């Protein structure tokens, strides 16, 4: 399916992506049923995170343990990175500790690729700067397919901070490969030039963009990556682009509501929308474990 690593979806085929989603079906059955698997018994999976995480880090560690692997966790804030150790040297140290897979999150785009080129372990990209977040996209695709039965022909609207979103990029590449219609919408300062080259429509009018939507995905306003004020205030952003009950129920009442998390309630989504019957936000978390089980079973367990 793919060779040693999962670094992004840009260069993967529709067949490879679908293969992971298909494999994740059985993984979800095992996870929600509490059935421990043993395909990674005797293996070690290490999470190496240079940025904060709740969902992704714990999801990968849960997935590894569900497959029978032992786990190690390395945080840049408490490791020898603080003493000046390079990424490559950290990776080689983990190789020497006989880890079988390194799950890396890093603020620099391309860091997982650099690591993969210099270690024997499998490398999985858990988010690199503003570049890609492949397993988040895979769990999003899994969630959509679970709801609608197919991704082909769906109208998927991504709302918010597209400029800084690695989730948006992975999703746009993957959704185009699988035959969905995609729209990005937000303030002009948060829509990067050339984004339409990824096969999406660009809109600056949320109410127009939501017409006919099957899936509405809010994207977090990433204030930690913004070096200048790109909109007047969070309140104004919410008024112009927030997904609230009036917009959801008035325009696309049956649309599936998604968000990669964490949600800034009252900004990207109102609390009512985040908790509504159409919301798949918590389901995405569950599906994330299943998809990451599938990825590691294929890469580390050799099931691809």
Image (tube, rainbow, N blue to C red):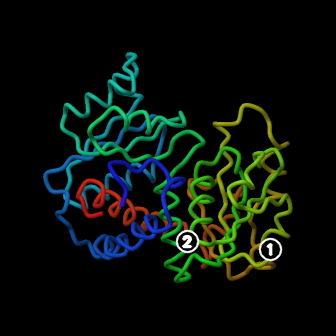
Tell me the residue at 37%/75% (across/down).
25
Left or right of 144: which side holds 18? left
Task: Identify residue for label 1.
Answer: 246
Residue 222, quarter of the rendered image: top right
The numbered mark at residue 280 is 2
Q: Name the foreground residue: 158 vs 172.
A: 172
Looking at the rendered structure, the secondary structure element under dot 2 is loop
* Residue, far left: 42
Query: Reading the chain from its start, which is encountered first: label 1 or label 2?
Result: 1
Q: CA distance from mark 1 to mark 2?
A: 19 Å
Q: Residue at x 75, y 72 (%)?
A: 245
Q: Image quarter for residue 151?
A: bottom right
Residue at 34 percent of width and 32 percent of height: 118
Q: Where 174 falls versus 101 (above or below)?
A: below
Q: Secondary structure at mark 1?
A: helix
Q: Position of residue 33 (x, y in %)?
A: 28, 76
Locate residue 298, reporting x and y percent.
30, 60
Residue 149 location, x and y as percent? 52, 83
Q: Quadrant of the N terminus?
A: bottom left
The residue most toward the top is 83
Q: Is residue 84 above or below residue 60?
A: above
**142 or 247: nearer the eye?**
142
């Amino acid at each position: 399916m793919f060779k040693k690593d999962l670094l992004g979806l840009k260069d993967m085929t529709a067949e490879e992506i679908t293969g992971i989603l298909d494999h994740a079906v059985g993984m979800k059955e095992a996870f929600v049923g509490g059935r421990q698997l043993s395909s990674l018994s005797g293996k070690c999976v290490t999470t190496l995170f240079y940025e904060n995480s709740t969902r992704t880090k714990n999801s990968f560690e849960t997935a590894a343990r569900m497959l029978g692997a032992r786990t190690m966790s390395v945080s840049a804030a408490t490791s020898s990175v603080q003493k000046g150790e390079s990424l490559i040297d950290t990776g080689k140290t983990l190789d020497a500790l006989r880890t079988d897979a390194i799950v890396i999150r890093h603020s620099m785009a391309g860091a997982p690729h650099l690591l993969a080129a210099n270690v024997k372990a499998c490398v999985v990209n858990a988010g690199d700067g503003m570049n890609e977040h492949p397993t988040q996209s895979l769990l999003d695709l899994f969630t959509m397919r679970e709801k609608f039965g197919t991704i082909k022909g769906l109208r998927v609207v991504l709302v918010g901070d597209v400029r800084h979103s690695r989730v948006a990029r992975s999703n746009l590449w993957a959704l185009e490969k699988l035959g969905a219609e995609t729209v990005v919408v937000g303030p002009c300062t948060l829509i990067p030039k050339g984004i339409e080259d990824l096969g999406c429509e660009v809109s600056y009018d949320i109410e127009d963009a939501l017409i006919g939507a099957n899936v509405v995905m809010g994207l977090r306003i990433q204030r930690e990556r913004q070096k200048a004020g790109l909109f007047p205030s969070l309140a104004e952003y919410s008024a112009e682009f927030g997904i609230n009950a009036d917009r959801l129920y008035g325009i696309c009442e049956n649309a599936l509501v998604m968000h990669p998390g964490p949600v800034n309630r009252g900004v990207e989504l109102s609390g009512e929308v985040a908790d509504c019957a159409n919301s798949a936000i918590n389901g995405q978390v569950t599906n994330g474990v299943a998809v990451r089980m599938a990825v590691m079973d294929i890469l580390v367990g050799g099931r691809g």
